[in-house]
Image: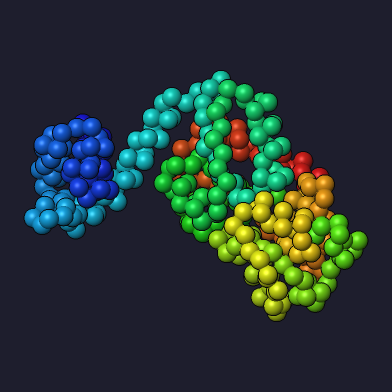
């Protein structure tokens, strides 16, 4: 009964409309209003201000909303836990990765996971790290693969591998035969970079600031594939993980000297959140595959 009251309350709080909430829940508006009223009576507090033309949360309602969301998430996880199967003969897993991992880590990892656990349904999203952390905290993802440091204290990370970024060019580029590039020369390069919402760009900008380099950024793109295609077809260069270039037949990775641009790839999960058997199996396999990639 309490779970239904919470469900109804959350719907009204989201829409701030009994009419819209009733339509979403497929119940009549009077029935919804009655259930919310019963909840308010049991709590001894008014949760919604219905006196004006628009429905608003009261101060008590705002406080209750925080805890109701948390309780609803815990109930969803409890349901998943009940139906979880320890022998991994069935199940599901929701995983997100930041874009650069799709070029070299995702393929081997998914191949190994599917070969070992063919009955587990895997849902994979490619998203920016900030949004990934938000979805993990909301219980809409089971785990993600991104970079240290993690922004939220409610998310824990498991180190996977050290990733080195390099100057990536086409074989026709004047520097394509070089093994390394000095920082001064890097500042003279015409670049295409991932746009600012990507963790990779944040780390690149930090590297430039540290070494007092003013980059010549002529193009930006919000998709990794677009950056790669621009490098293939133009004289522009970019900064991407060296492994991304190694995975392409027609890209060349040139090491940055004297200080390389490195970062730690990590597996993210909600701290103290329920970890299904499939999530634990994925974590173990991600560690194994990452170790092979660094050998």
Apparent side of residue 139 relative to residue 189 in the rendered image (left or right): left
Apparent side of residue 213 relative to residue 142 in the rendered image (left or right): right
Of residues 52 and 101, the one drawn nearer to the viewer in this rendering? 52
Seen as rendered, the residue at the extreme right is 177
Residue 124 at what x, y percent from top left? 56, 39
Would residue 225 be visible to someone looking at this image? yes
Residue 229 at what x, y percent from top left? 72, 53
Query: Residue 233 is drawn in which quadrant?
Result: bottom right
Q: Look at 51% across and 50% down and name the residue there.
A: 132
Q: Quadrant of the N terminus?
A: top left
Q: Look at 66% across and 66% down and name the residue there.
A: 219
Q: Look at 56% across and 32% down and name the residue there.
A: 122
Q: How is the image coloured?
A: rainbow
Marker count (numbered): 0
Apparent side of residue 91 relative to residue 28 in the rendered image (left or right): right
Q: Look at 68% across and 70% down and name the residue there.
A: 218
Would residue 199 be visible to someone looking at this image? no
Apparent side of residue 79 relative to residue 122 in the rendered image (left or right): left
User: Compared with residue 181, is residue 158 higher up or lower down, i.e. above or below?
Assistant: above
Residue 242 at what x, y percent from top left? 77, 55
User: Compared with residue 203, is residue 112 higher up or lower down, i.e. above or below?
Assistant: above
Residue 118 at what x, y percent from top left? 62, 23
Q: Quadrant of the C terminus?
A: top right
Of residues 218 and 20, the one drawn nearer to the viewer in this rendering? 218
Query: Residue 49 is drawn in which quadrant?
Result: bottom left
């Amino acid at each position: 009964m309490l779970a239904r009251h919470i469900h109804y309350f959350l719907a009204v709080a989201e829409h701030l409309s009994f009419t819209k909430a009733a339509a979403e829940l497929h119940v009549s508006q009077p029935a919804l209003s009655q259930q919310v009223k019963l909840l308010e009576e049991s709590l001894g507090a008014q949760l919604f201000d219905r006196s004006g033309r628009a429905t608003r949360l009261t101060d008590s309602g705002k406080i209750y909303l925080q805890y109701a969301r948390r309780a609803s998430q815990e109930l969803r996880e409890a349901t998943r836990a009940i139906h979880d199967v320890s022998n991994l003969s069935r199940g599901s897993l929701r995983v997100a990765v930041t874009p650069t991992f799709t070029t070299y880590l995702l393929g081997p990892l998914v191949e190994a996971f599917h070969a070992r656990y063919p009955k587990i349904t895997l849902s994979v999203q490619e998203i920016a790290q900030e949004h990934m952390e938000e979805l993990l905290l909301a219980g809409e993802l089971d785990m993600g693969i991104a970079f240290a440091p993690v922004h939220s204290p409610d998310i824990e990370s498991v180190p996977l591998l050290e990733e080195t970024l390099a100057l990536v060019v086409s074989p026709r580029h004047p520097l394509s035969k070089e093994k390394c590039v000095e920082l001064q020369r890097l500042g003279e390069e015409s670049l295409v970079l991932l746009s600012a919402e990507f963790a990779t760009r944040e780390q690149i900008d930090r590297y430039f600031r540290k070494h007092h380099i003013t980059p010549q950024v002529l193009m930006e793109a919000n998709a990794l594939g677009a950056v790669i295609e621009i490098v293939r077809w133009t004289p522009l260069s970019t900064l991407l993980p060296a492994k991304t270039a190694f995975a392409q037949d027609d890209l060349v990775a040139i090491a940055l000297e004297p200080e390389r641009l490195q970062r730690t790839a990590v597996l993210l999960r909600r701290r103290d959140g329920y970890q299904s058997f499939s999530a634990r199996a994925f974590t173990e396999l991600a560690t194994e595959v990452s170790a092979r990639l660094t050998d």
